[in-house]
Amino acid sequence: MMKAQSGSSVEDTDEKYAHLWFASLCKFHIIPDNESQQWDFDEKHVLAFLRDKLAKKTPTWKRLKIVHGLIWYRNHVRHSRTPRLEHLRSKLQEVVINDAFEQQDRTIEEATGKGQNELDILPFQPFRATNRVFQGTQGDASLCPGL
């Protein structure tokens, strides 16, 4: 019997990985299956999990996907805004971009340029640089493997 398609395949993939990463987080923190739905994970739990992944040499792009999945899980399954994980996602995105440009022997500034009206203190500069890179590649995600 064929399953009716619901939503986009991206949304289905996000949901699949969100559940996978949450289950992996629970397993790492030794949370029994019957208690996982009530477990209130926080930023410290996620950081410990990410540090373990880093110690196991998990690439940055994959750790970024973990955070993305846990944010999706928090928003769509728990219908919550806590724990706050967006700053972790931003930092990992920055590291992914730095890694991508280190492999090309260029600095981010050389590769993305800087808008005339951008100040160095703007909090959006890394985000805007990411957008310029992605737009400049016309969607070629191979230059930004974690995005």
Image (spheres, helix red, strand yellow):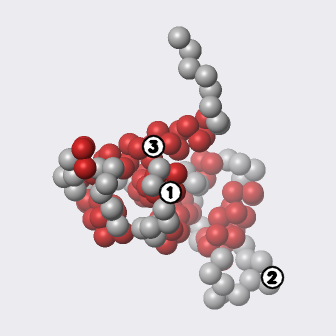
In the picture shown, does residue 135 fall above or below 42?
above
Q: Residues within 10 Å of mark 1 (few under 14, many from 20)?
A: few
Residue at 35% across, 67% down = 42
Residue bearing the label numbered 1: 79
Where in the figure is residue 114, as x and y percent of width and height?
Answer: 73, 77
Q: Is residue 123 left or right of residue 79?
A: right
Q: Earlier in the sequence, mark 3 or mark 1?
A: 3
Q: Is residue 77 visible?
A: yes
The span from disc 1 to disc 2 (Cα, nearest Å) is 40 Å
Amino acid beneath label 3: Tyr
Residue bearing the label numbered 3: 17
Q: Nearer the viewer, mark 3 or mark 1?
A: 1
In the picture shown, does residue 18 fall above or below 132?
above
- Residue 116: which numbered mark, if any? 2
Where in the figure is residue 6, as x and y percent of width and height?
Answer: 62, 31
Question: Is label 2 in contact with label 3 (beta carbons under 8 Å)?
Answer: no
For label 1, the SS is loop
Depth check: 85 or 31 in front? 31
In the picture shown, does residue 32 fall above or below 110?
above
Q: Residues within 10 Å of mark 2 (few under 14, many from 20)?
A: few
Q: Earlier in the sequence, mark 1 or mark 2?
A: 1
For label 3, the SS is helix
Q: Residues within 10 Å of mark 3 (few under 14, many from 20)?
A: some
Residue at 44% across, 67% down = 82
Depth check: 45 or 108 in front? 45
